[in-house]
Each structure stands twice: as C-alpha cells, then as structure tokens.
Amino acid sequence: MSSETAARFSVSLPQQLLADLDSMVQAKSYDNRSLAIADMIRRDLVEHRAKLPKGESTATVTLVFDHHQHHVQAALTDLQHDATCEVVATMHVHLDHHQCLEVIVVRGKARAIQQMADQLIAVKGVEFGRLTFATAV
Ligand code: NI
C-alpha cells in the first residue's frame, strides 16, 4: 500500500465468499485482506477506465447466476429488452442444481454494450460477470 492515509469502510459479504477470499489471501501470500482487496479494486478500475472500441462492436457478456434467487432471470431479461444495443444470441447452460451460465452476444455502440453489461453484472444473484469485446480496439 502507498503512504497515503488508509480509509476504512465496511462491506457485507456472503460467509462463503469471505472464506474463499481468505483462502486466496493466504494462497497468494498477502499480509492481509485489505491488500488483496485493494489489488482487486485496482484491476477492476483499469478495466473500467480502458478505452472503448470505436463505432460498431460485437461483444460477449458471460454471466453465472443462481436461478433460485428471486427475480434474477426476469431482471436479466428486462435489461436485455430495454438495452439500446442489439442482443444477437443467448446461450444458456444449466451448470448444476443452482447455477446457470449465460453467454449473451451483443452488437452495437461500445458504450451501449458496456452500459447493458454493467447493469446485467450488477443484478443481485449474479455471481460472476464478464464483458469481452470481440472487436479490435
Ligand atoms: Ni439454467
């Protein structure tokens, strides 16, 4: 961590996620959780600030979610219907009793794609989400 003053804030996490985080902190030899979380935040910020492709783009949005979570599937569908980018295709795989994997292929302006992906990934019940542009930057 740099010499700047650290700020404290509290975060609520599912117990299993916290246990998994602690295992990773140990496996990666971090001195403490805060250092690991700061690195994760920096990585996400780099991705968040990356320049978007210009013009029309094609991208995939990969989501893993628990279909037993109330309304998660309906929320994902609503967001796709309301998006200003075009949803070209969706593949749904039932991973196990709880989890579903969805790969959504989208086309449109990069900013619109990013906006929809951000909204999908932020839906409660989505446990993993990743946007990948398939167009050269
Ligand atoms: Ni499923």
Image (cartoon, grey):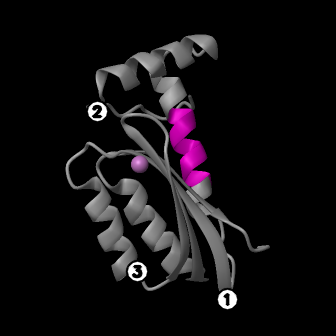
Compared with 111, 71 (above or below) is above
Residue 60 makes an appearance in the image = yes
- The local secondary structure at tag 2 comes to loop
Residue at position x 69%, y 77% in the image:
53
Residue wearing tag 3: 83
Mark nearer the N terminus (3 vs 2): 2
Left or right of residue 97, residue 63 in this image: right
Q: What's the residue type where badge 1 is placed?
A: Gly
Is residue 109 among the parts visible in the rendering?
Answer: no
Q: Pick out the residue farthest to the right.
A: 136
What residue span does the magenta drawing correspond to? 38-46
Q: Secondary structure at mark 1?
A: loop
**Is the CB–ligand 1 distance for label 3 below 8 Å?**
no
What residue is pinned by disc 2? Answer: 11
At which x and y percent is residue 24? Answer: 55, 19
Q: Earlier in the sequence, mark 1 or mark 3?
A: 1
Mark 1 to mark 2 CA distance (whole Å): 38 Å
Quadrant into which the N terminus falls? top right
Estimate how packed mark 1 is, as few (under 14), some (14 to 19) or many (20 or more) residues with alpha carbons within 10 Å. Answer: few
At label 2, the amino acid type is Val
Q: Is residue 110 left or right of residue 99?
A: right
Q: Residue furthest bottom?
A: 55
Image spot of residue 68 (x, y percent): 26, 42
Q: Which marked residue is nearer to the observer: mark 1 or mark 3?
A: 3
Instruction: Give the quarter of the figure containing the C terminus.
Output: bottom right
Residue 30: x and y in percent read: 58, 16
- Rendered image quadrant of residue 134: bottom right
Whether tag 3 and tag 2 are in contact, CB under 8 A, the answer is: no
Label 3, label 2: how many angstroms apart (C-alpha)? 30 Å
* Residue beneath disc 1: 55
